[in-house]
Amino acid sequence: MAAPATASARPAPSAQRWPGAGWAVLWALAWLLVLVPGAGWSGLAKAQGVPADSGLSSYTLGAGDVISIRVLGEEEFTKQEIRLTDAGTIFYPAVGEIRINGTTLGELERIITNGLRGRILVNPRVSVEINTYRPFFFTGMVKNPGSFPYQPGLTVRKAASLAGGFEERASLKKIFVIREGDRTQTPQRIELDAPVGPGDLVTVEESFF
């Protein structure tokens, strides 16, 4: 009678046993971003290793932002390019009025997911993305003062380049910002590498020396 097989008799794993396994893993990760609730814009940022202070995951929505809301496989719940107003709310089918101002993308995804789950859909897959950021404002000694769409990771130096660059007589030691949400509207002196947020007003004064 033949002896029973032992663990040592098992064939050694082969690198060719699962051809294309690497691609399968990549596809699985890609679908995970789509299918897992909350894995929209904010989830994608985490998957790509974007630091939390880059603005992608911590960005809070406000008047002037344009967003799109998608529910996988449910066109009736997909809303494209919604411009947020000073009212701070939107009406969403089957959920009702949602207060948006001050929420992050991930928080809004969870609000909509919880509103649809159970009563309307078994397991809704919600994704929220920003189409256009609300602007910041740059005045003073720059070549093209005005309003410009915010960008994640924006600094004074980058913001100035969007405004055409500094004028020759701009004082780089006299740059001030009034932060969005500052009820006192108090100008704060900042450096070139200081962050600029959505709704901020940056002013560069003239140098007289």
Image (spheres, grey):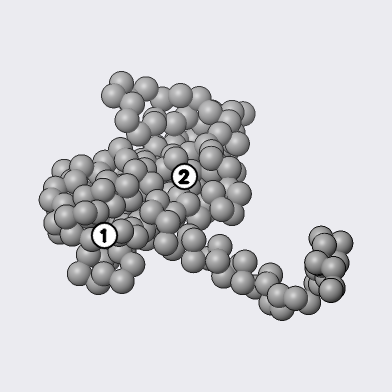
Q: What element carries label 1?
A: loop
Residue in front for this viewpoint, 101 or 109: 109
Quadrant of residue 184 within the rendered picture: top left
- The x and y percentages for residue 82 are 25, 59
Decide if residue 96 is on the left or right side of residue 74.
Answer: left
> Mark 2, residues whose alpha carbon is within 10 Å: few (<14), some, or many (≥20)?
many
* Residue shown at 71% from the left, 78% from the top: 19
- The x and y percentages for residue 25 are 62, 66
Residue in front for this viewpoint, 66 or 173: 66
Task: Kindly tell me whether residue 163 is visible in this rendering.
Answer: no
Q: In which quadrant will I find the C terminus?
A: top right
- The x and y percentages for residue 16 are 78, 77
Q: What residue type is labelled 1?
A: Val
* Residue shown at 56% from the left, 34% from the top: 194
Residue 122 - label = 1
Residue 57 - label = 2
Q: What residue type is labelled 2?
A: Ser
